Image (spheres, rainbow, N blue to C red):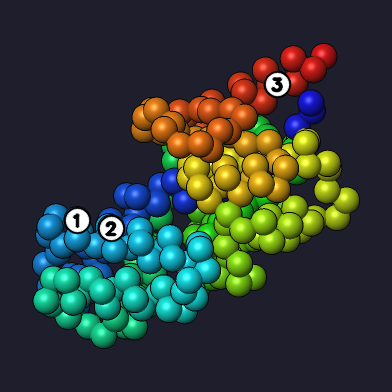
Amino acid sequence: MQIQRLLFDADNTLIDFSNASKAAFWQTFEDYGHTCTDDIHATYQPINHQVWTDFEQGKITAKRLRVKRFADLFEAIDLSPALPEDFSKRYLENLIIKSESYDGVKEMLDGLHSYYHMSIITNGLREVQRPRLRKLDMTHYFDSIIVSDEIGIAKPDERYFEIAFHSIDNPPPRENTLVIGDNLKSDILGGIRYGLKTCWLNASGKANDTDIKPDYEIQNILELPDLLKNMQEANE
């Protein structure tokens, strides 16, 4: 099997979303004259996770997602620093500012760029994902960028992967395409259902206790070039 195309998830795969989102969350409270706390952030995390899960399952729209997570948070903590709509807009602006790629990612992409077709597949919001990639000077590495909010369908829906797969002319066969992502459900399950090879970025090193079985597993994104090299050598 010769891999010819790489489909990269963005957040927590190439871009350090966890740190950026926390910093943006804190900053947004400060922007509206309030001090954030660890307890507030801890309250927000499961709310945000549930809202994103509902979005990925098609239960709510991206437009609703933007507002609901903060409306639910403000109700839970009995504090409203701003209207949820305004807070969401400022948070997304701060998220762009605070975003950083993981160390070594751009150098890795430089090395892969000459050998593979590469695309971004992300369940992010339209006003954030492309500006973040531009800010980090990463856009030019990718032949296509597919943002769920722009197409109205999210990973792991097979329709998302159908659009992503055909986002370039003459895509290589599915078995020659590798999905790389940190989320077993949205990235890996979606790739498996569409018939693509999958590589799970398991940065935590925790055991996979699900029925979702990726073809490959790495614990650091910078392990990917060696994995691809080993895959190539195995076919020679």
Left or right: 115 with respect to 224? Answer: right
**Mark 3, other Cα within 10 Å: few <14 / some 14–19 / many ≥20:** some
What label does residue 46 carry, if any?
Answer: 2
Residue at position x 73%, y 57% in the image: 162
- Camera-side mark, 1 or 2: 2
Label 1 Cα neighbours within 10 Å, binned few <14 / some 14-19 / many ≥20:
few
The secondary element bearing badge 3 is classed as: helix
Residue designated by label 3: 231
The residue lying toward the viewer, choosing from 208 and 109, is: 208
Residue 85 picture quarter: bottom left
Image location (x, y in percent) of residue 92:
39, 69
Image position of 139 with respect to 61: above or below:
above
Report whether residue 74 is seen.
yes
Kind of residue at badge 1: Ala
* 88 is higher (above) or lower (below) than 45: below
Q: Which mark is residue 50?
A: none
Q: Which mark is in front, 3 or 2?
A: 2
Residue 184 location (% of width, % of height): 50, 42
Q: Secondary structure beneath disc 1?
A: helix
**Which residue is outermost to the front?**
211
- Give the Cα separation between the discs numbered 1 and 2: 8 Å
Residue 50 position, x and y percent, is 35, 61
Mark 1 = which residue?
42
